[in-house]
Image (tube, rainbow, N blue to C red):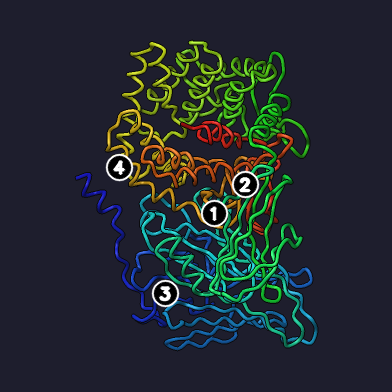
Amino acid sequence: MRNIMKHLLYTASSLILIALGSCSHSKNIIFRADTQTGALNGLYMANDTSINWILCADGTQYEWVDSRCGWGLGHFWINGTKYFWSTPKEKDSTANRMTVKYQVENIEITVVRTWNEDGNLVESYEFANTGKENASLQEIAINTPFNDNYPDARTCYNARCNAHIWTGGNDAYVYCTRMSGAPGGLGLILQKGAVEGYEISERSEKTGGSNFRGVFQLNPENKILKPGECYTIQWLLLSADNWNDFQTKAIGNGLIIATANRYVVEEGEEVTVSFKSNFPSLKGKLLLNNKEVAEVNGDNINYTTTLNAPGEQIFTLSYDDGKKTSVECLTVSNFDSLINRRCRFIAEHQQFIKSGDPRNGAFIVYDNDTESLYINGESGQERADCDEARERVAMGILLALQYQYTSDKKMKDALNSYVSFVRRIQRADYTTNSTVDFQSYNRGYNYPWVADFWFTMFRATGDRQYLKDGYGTLRALVRYFNHDFYCIGVPTYGYTLLKDNNFTAEADTLLNDFKLMADVFYENGPNYPTFEVNYEQSIVGPSIIHLLNVYMLTGNEKYLKGAESQLPLLESFGGKQPSFHLNDIAIRHWDGYWFGKDQIWGDTFPHYWSTLSGIAFRLYAKATGKQEYAERALNIFRNNFCLFSEDGRGSCAFIYPNKVNGQKAHFYDPFANDQDWAMVHWLKYGPNFE
């Protein structure tokens, strides 16, 4: 019965084919348009209508996603005033062409949808100045509401996509992968104009919260139009089996695809950037941080240089009379020294010291704006994601790991105080809370993190009591949550530590627990339960990680097969855009709100939990010998170093979009909060992993 239900759950049900006035069997991409606004409510592949790649902008999918949000509508600013186009002044449709005209003040917007000879959909947006004076169009935003949201695992598997956006100037693109990881994605390839960013709207706790990525809007470049002058944005929509197929088709349709051999390097390391096109006669200039470094030509441009200065390194290809695209790299001084500076910053600035206060010794949030600790509740606002424990246990683990390399007395003293604090968030039976007053709910994620801390302290000190503490904490996890909680970071290495130190019975008990957890993850497959978020990369990743760890402890092939079956879902969360913010970085879009100072919703690229994908890839490479996954893992880990500054400060998230709900974004949040898991994972699974 279980297998029958799983088959029913994950076989995408066929949609009744909607009568699309402009579709035929010769077209690869078909659409459904709103008869009132002229915007799109549906976008489908003709050979597979099981997934609508865009949001239904009629309130049926989400009540707040109404006609305002339709694909192809939008807004711009002129002289400080925001104008929307939403009501057509003219519409015309035939079997092979749809034209919709809008008039906003002195700007006429003409939207044309047609098909090329390959059956792919071409959309153009022409902005024409019909007035008698220059018109300065600023912050143009065109609605492109990709269907990237999270009702539940079943719906995501069958009918949702992960939208990977690259606003690469004249060579911008979007590739949407199926959340199931199955072949066949939707690609958007820019053909005219330039896209320099994107926005997210309709984000709040009341509009989907952490389970709704938002309504996307692409931002073309700003333009000053003279009377009678026009500016056109045009893109092509097509299907592609996977990233390689998409990039090949993009190049074949005139796009330049940019890449780098790595996106974050240490000072003094080489980096190679590449630009591939189908233009053998292409000539241009390559700039590094706006300074010309080379003249280049050909359809396969490669440039290698040594990066010597810490900071962002933006390589820009300028070609064809002003067209541009780029690669975004980052240089850090040295990974090891940066980790050490971060650890010293934590010990010196992020430990709460107040004699007599039960929180004494805790590592807590630091506000880089005010140069001070953020004491949860002092401002009158209680924020669970800024309390004295939970994700912030990473700081304790990081210091304990680093102490093994440095024997730094300052770190030792900080750790001794922290040990006393952690004992105050645990009862004698190892019930573990998020706060010392035990007023927080019993959160499952706390247990593996605190157990990891105890095991790491054993490695740092040799004190066998920490082994007992780690064991007791993991047993409490099972006592409260059985074997079906999808923990982040179950320290399965605790089994080996216990066994090697003659805690044989305890080791065997933990191994049995680990196997029972893995059995649940294997049986569930992609049928993930709902936890704090309905569906996310940090439930898929931990499932794969635990299955791989138990496979390597037991040699049981079923656990490897279980991990492999889920790997495509995890890979779907990461894109191939040429930026240290984005390349193979998993989509997350709510942590800036919950963990950040400015509490802004929207894509967080990178977010440190993207390293969970790196751990899964690293373990998979070890289990199978497929070293390309090890390289991908290291790339993910390195990319996350952008969350730390050279003086040891941290940022919990980079809010990537240009705007979120109209508020300017694209910045590092001022809170140093929970980002230190990125460094923990580098030390555990980075270059020294065996």
**Disc 3 or 4, which lies upstream in sequence?**
3
Q: Which residue is mark 2?
A: 264
Q: Residues within 10 Å of mark 2 (few under 14, many from 20)?
A: many
Q: Which residue is mark 4?
A: 561
Q: Residue at x 31, y 37 (%)?
A: 559
Circles 2 and 4 in contact, beta carbons < 8 Å: no
Q: Residues within 10 Å of mark 3 (few under 14, many from 20)?
A: many
- Image position, residue 344 (x, y; %): 70, 26
Q: Residue at x 74, y 38 (%)?
A: 368
Q: Would you identify the image quadrant in which residue 418 lies?
A: top right
Mark 3 vs mark 4: in front: 4
Disc 1 versus disc 4: distance between alpha carbons? 38 Å
Disc 2 versus disc 4: distance between alpha carbons? 33 Å
- When the figure is inspected, residue 34 is found, relative to residue 574, above or below; the finding is below
Q: Which residue is mark 3?
A: 29
What's the residue type where badge 1 is placed?
Answer: Thr
